Image (cartoon, rainbow, N blue to C red):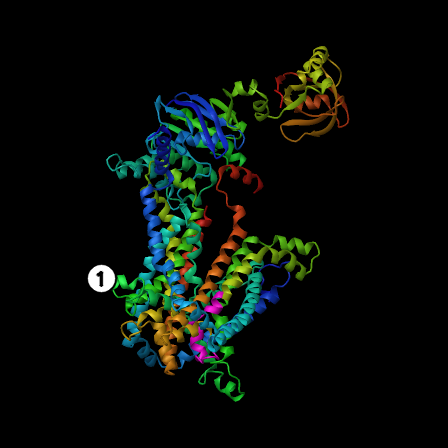
């Protein structure tokens, strides 16, 4: 062993004693992480695609091209197309009121907004059954006027909205609170109208988080299973969304088709995670300083 | 415990933070490492503590080399700029921490630890705060807790990293007098990092002025203030008026010998000669009283505070200079903005600056 | 609306945005949710009590809450390790791990359900190696645990990670200069800082698991009294048009969710209050 590597070794040992662990502990911890994530993340992720492609590429593609699958995809897209914009609008409105104003009951509202996340999806569906079902409050009146909500598109949309209400608001509220109100106040004092202020000051400041909120909301809207399962009635070709279609195929022992449709939903999840990574890079990276020399430079900027 | 720093170099990536630094500190001394941010003073302190390792060079504590010794074996007390108190522990628990983590065989009994904590809190005048949490203390109190905590393990060497940097001016002033008294009582070898020249000059036995990883000057506060080794030290230790060689008339006047100045200009070396004069070393008169004087116009008078500051424009060169007068002298002169005065330096220092 | 304002503001849109948000949220969430309580109030106390203490219901609580708790504990341990490794170490694949941790949050539960069922069944990728050891996971209560552990995975990581990131390096250095070794520093200085976040993350994972439906039903086997979770029991009652039964159990679940949400809020308040101090 030459002196250079000895010096390097000494340095490693020396550093280790300070603010990090010994290499052995470090490697063990990293190994534990990979072991755990292999069991619960990597293998399931690989398995979705492996199972979907078991019958070959032709069978995989065939799984989407039949009438029922296409109907499920169409319905899922339609539900998301209604639910996501509405929830985005709600998210921006709620975040604006909460982040920029001090009002009575604000803390209660913040807590309430998270509530749909705490409620079991089955209960989210159940409450609409109680409201719109044949024995429900509005059931008789709806039947009289020949309006169907339950076991039809409106019910599915409502249940989906319920489950995904908080996502955009949750992304925006902490961000807008931390941004404060000075920039908007400046815009107003400079003579901007409310709309100009929103479009030219507020929106540019929140666009990345808004985008991520929308993407996350969309992923959950397209993937919602429990709540939709309760209100859909499982009518094939009519009220089956993609997750429900996956269930039916799986219960019919049509594993290849079930996993094929599931793989589409998995891709959606992966796209969502990628979007998150991109948004995080766009919103946080300028503040991350690892190199001490750049810390000196950054110090003068901040 | 004496400290010997021997040709220490430290790099972070391509950036050299410490460049061949050597330093000797005697037992019982309190030394200040003084310099602007980024000069390497904190890195040197962290190397002494064992928080960083030098790339080159060696460290001796009390004659024994400790370059590769672990931090826990060095017995140094370290006080951080932002206190680094354990916020979930009471003041007493914070102070006791270093004793409670000793190996069981060396650990004092619980009652002995409590006694010791009481003593230390008495020393930093915080007996009443023992059961409070750090968040319930003021900044100055927190820093005193941090100091008591560092002293609990009876270090042979006390290292203080900008200990008063995060405090407001008044508390800072109080604390540094107090630190000086504490040091006189305990006689523990101490090194203090600061970017505040007033603090360094007031507290330390000796001052080490650092700049861009190099030691610029080492000396007592009087030495470095009265005889700065180079323009950097001169500038860093206080306000200064700079007269460049090319500004011939004013500079020549300051130098007091116009012939010498023109001779210098002829051979082209003196272009890099620079004269430094502190604002309070400039003497003002209403009439010409000696041949060294040059004329200047009063532009502003700032009379608030214990001393009066004037901004003057040198007539020959249009250079702006700053002068500091006592209130009495200012009243005697009875100066107004726009009036012309005669200026000459009581003290000055000329440096030859190498070609840039 | 402006009457609610604690202080006037030059910014526009308060009435409009708050009005819309409250209207929307009431229609979508509050009014339908209150229907659950109205419906329950139509039951007599005895009826209600009988439904919610029926042996099948009690067995389902035991499984749901028990498996959720164990899952939260497993995630408490591994989630902390993941957060630690992600913040403190640099290793190949780190960015990928960091991004994938959120997968259980983004993946539709039905997909998670069929996938876990497939790999943990006796001929699946993992199940086939456990079968000879006498361990059956799919279609047993253990399957419920696997599914609930999976869906709770991101919570502890994502609550502990930012706290660890913000942890002042100086505090650890201070402990070291005072003579503490690595383990002492970890126990006395780092753990107390992480503790509130860790508890919050575990409570969140637990709350999420208690209500979970989609990922569990495929792997659980769904045998009454043995491997049937409470949300599935509600579903079964609904399919039998037993709305009262479903509602009563729904109220129990909802009450549990509220209590958990309250605990999580308190924990979060506790941890931020501690952070505000310095």
Asked whether, in this view, residue C37 is left or right of residue B229, the answer is left
In the image, which residues are magenta?
A219-240
- The quadrant of the image that shows the N terminus of chain C is bottom right
In the figure, A232 relative to A293: above or below? below
Q: Name the residue under label 1.
A: C133
Q: Where is residue C232 in the image (x, y as percent from the top left)?
A: 35, 74
Q: Position of residue B240 (x, y in %)?
A: 63, 24
In the figure, C273 relative to B297: above or below? below
Asked whether, in this view, residue C1 is left or right of residue C236, the answer is right
The quarter of the displayed image where residue B117 is located: top left
At horizontal 33% and vertical 42% (from top left) the residue drawn is: A23
Q: Position of residue B86 (x, y in %)?
A: 39, 43
In the figure, C174 relative to A255: above or below? above
The quarter of the displayed image where residue C139 is located: bottom left
Count the labels in the image.
1
At horizontal 38% and vertical 70% (from top left) the residue drawn is: C213
Q: Nearer the viewer, residue A50 or A23?
A: A50
The answer to whether residue B290 is seen in the rendering is: no
Task: Specify the subunit that label 1 lies on.
Answer: C
Q: Where is residue C89 in the image (x, y as percent from the top left)?
A: 40, 45
In the figure, A28 relative to B98: above or below? below
Look at the image and say whether residue B63 sits in the magenta stretch. Answer: no
- Furthest residue to the bottom? A144
């Amino acid at each position: 062993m030459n002196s250079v590597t000895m010096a390097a070794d000494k340095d490693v040992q020396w550093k280790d004693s300070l603010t990090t662990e010994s290499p052995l502990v470090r490697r063990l911890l990293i190994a534990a992480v990979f072991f755990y994530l292999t069991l619960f993340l990597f293998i399931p992720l690989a398995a979705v695609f492996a199972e979907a492609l078991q019958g070959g590429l032709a069978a995989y593609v065939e799984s989407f091209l039949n009438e029922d699958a296409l109907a499920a995809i169409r319905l899922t897209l339609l539900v998301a197309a209604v639910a996501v914009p509405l929830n985005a609008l709600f998210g921006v409105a709620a975040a604006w009121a909460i982040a920029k104003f001090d009002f009575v009951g604000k803390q209660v509202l913040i807590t309430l907004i998270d509530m749909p996340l705490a409620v079991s999806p089955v209960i989210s569906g159940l409450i609409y059954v109680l409201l719109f079902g044949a024995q429900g409050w509005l059931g008789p009146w709806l039947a009289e006027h020949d309006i169907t909500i339950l076991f039809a598109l409106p019910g599915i949309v409502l249940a989906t909205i319920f489950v995904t209400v908080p996502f955009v608001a949750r992304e925006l509220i902490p961000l807008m609170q931390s941004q404060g109100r000075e920039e908007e106040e400046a815009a107003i004092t400079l003579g901007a109208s409310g709309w100009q202020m929103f479009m030219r000051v507020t929106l540019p400041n929140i666009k990345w988080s808004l985008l991520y909120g929308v993407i996350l909301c969309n992923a959950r809207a397209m993937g919602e299973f429990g709540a939709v399962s309760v209100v859909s009635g499982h009518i094939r070709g009519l009220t089956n969304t993609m997750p429900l279609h996956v269930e039916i195929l799986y219960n019919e022992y049509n594993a290849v088709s079930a996993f094929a449709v599931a793989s589409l939903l998995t891709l959606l999840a992966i796209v969502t995670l990628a979007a998150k990574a991109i948004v995080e890079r766009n919103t946080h990276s300028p503040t991350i300083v690892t190199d001490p020399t750049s810390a000196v430079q950054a110090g003068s900027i901040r | 415990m004496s400290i010997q720093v021997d040709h220490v170099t430290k790099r972070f990536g391509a950036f050299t933070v410490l460049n061949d630094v050597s330093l000797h500190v005697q037992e019982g001394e309190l030394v200040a490492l003084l310099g602007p941010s980024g000069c390497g003073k904190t890195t040197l302190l962290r190397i002494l503590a064992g928080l960083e390792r030098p790339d080159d060079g060696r460290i001796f504590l009390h004659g024994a080399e400790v370059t590769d010794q672990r931090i826990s074996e060095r017995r140094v007390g370290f006080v951080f700029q932002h206190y680094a108190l354990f916020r979930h522990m009471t003041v007493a628990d914070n102070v006791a921490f270093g004793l409670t983590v000793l190996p069981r065989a060396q650990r004092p009994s619980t009652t002995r630890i409590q006694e010791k904590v009481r003593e230390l809190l008495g020393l930093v005048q915080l007996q009443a705060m023992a059961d409070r949490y750090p968040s319930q203390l003021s900044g100055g109190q927190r820093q005193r807790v941090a100091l008591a905590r560092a002293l609990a393990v009876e270090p042979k060497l006390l290292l203080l990293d900008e200990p008063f940097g995060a405090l407001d001016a008044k508390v800072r002033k109080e604390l540094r007098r107090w630190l000086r008294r504490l040091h006189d009582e305990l006689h523990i070898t101490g090194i203090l990092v600061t970017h505040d020249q007033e603090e360094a000059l007031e507290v330390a036995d000796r001052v080490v002025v650092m700049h861009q990883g190099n030691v610029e000057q080492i000396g007592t506060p009087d030495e470095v203030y009265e005889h700065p080794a180079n323009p950097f030290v001169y500038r860093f230790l206080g306000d200064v008026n700079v007269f460049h060689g090319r500004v011939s008339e004013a500079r020549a006047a300051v130098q007091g010998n116009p012939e010498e100045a023109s001779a210098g200009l002829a051979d082209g070396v003196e272009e890099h000669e620079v004269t430094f004069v502190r604002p309070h070393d400039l003497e003002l008169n209403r009439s010409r009283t000696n041949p060294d004087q040059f004329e200047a116009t009063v532009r502003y008078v700032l009379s608030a505070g214990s001393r009066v500051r004037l901004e003057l424009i040198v007539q020959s060169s249009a250079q702006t200079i700053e002068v500091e007068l006592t209130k009495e002298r200012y009243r005697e002169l009875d100066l107004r903005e726009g009036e012309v005065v005669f200026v000459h330096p009581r003290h000055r220092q000329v440096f030859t600056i190498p070609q840039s | 609306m402006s009457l609610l304002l604690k202080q006037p503001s030059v910014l526009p849109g308060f009435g409009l945005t708050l009005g819309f948000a409250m209207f929307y949220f009431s229609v979508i969430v509050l009014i339908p949710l209150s229907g659950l309580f109205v419906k329950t109030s139509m039951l007599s106390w005895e009826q209600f009590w009988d439904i919610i203490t029926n042996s099948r219901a009690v067995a389902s609580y035991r499984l749901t809450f028990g498996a959720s708790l164990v899952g939260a504990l497993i995630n408490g341990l591994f989630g902390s390790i993941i957060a630690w490794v992600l913040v403190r170490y640099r290793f190949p694949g780190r960015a990928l791990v960091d991004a994938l941790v959120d997968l259980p949050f983004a993946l539709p539960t039905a997909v998670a359900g069929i996938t876990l069922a497939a790999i943990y069944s006796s001929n699946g990728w993992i199940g086939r190696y456990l079968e000879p050891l006498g361990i059956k996971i799919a279609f047993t209560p253990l399957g419920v645990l696997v599914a609930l552990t999976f869906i709770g995975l991101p919570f502890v990581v994502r609550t502990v990670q930012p706290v660890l990131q913000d942890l002042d390096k100086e505090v650890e250095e201070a402990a070291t200069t005072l003579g503490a070794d690595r383990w002492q520093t970890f126990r006395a200085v780092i753990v107390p800082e992480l503790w509130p976040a860790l508890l919050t993350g575990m409570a969140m994972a637990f709350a999420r698991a208690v209500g979970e439906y989609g990922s569990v039903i495929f792997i659980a086997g769904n045998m009454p009294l043995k491997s049937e979770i409470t949300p599935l029991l509600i579903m079964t009652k609904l399919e039998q048009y037993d709305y009262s039964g479903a509602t009563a159990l729904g109220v129990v679940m909802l009450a549990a969710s509220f209590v958990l949400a309250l605990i999580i809020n308190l924990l979060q308040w506790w941890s931020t209050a501690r952070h505000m101090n310095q």
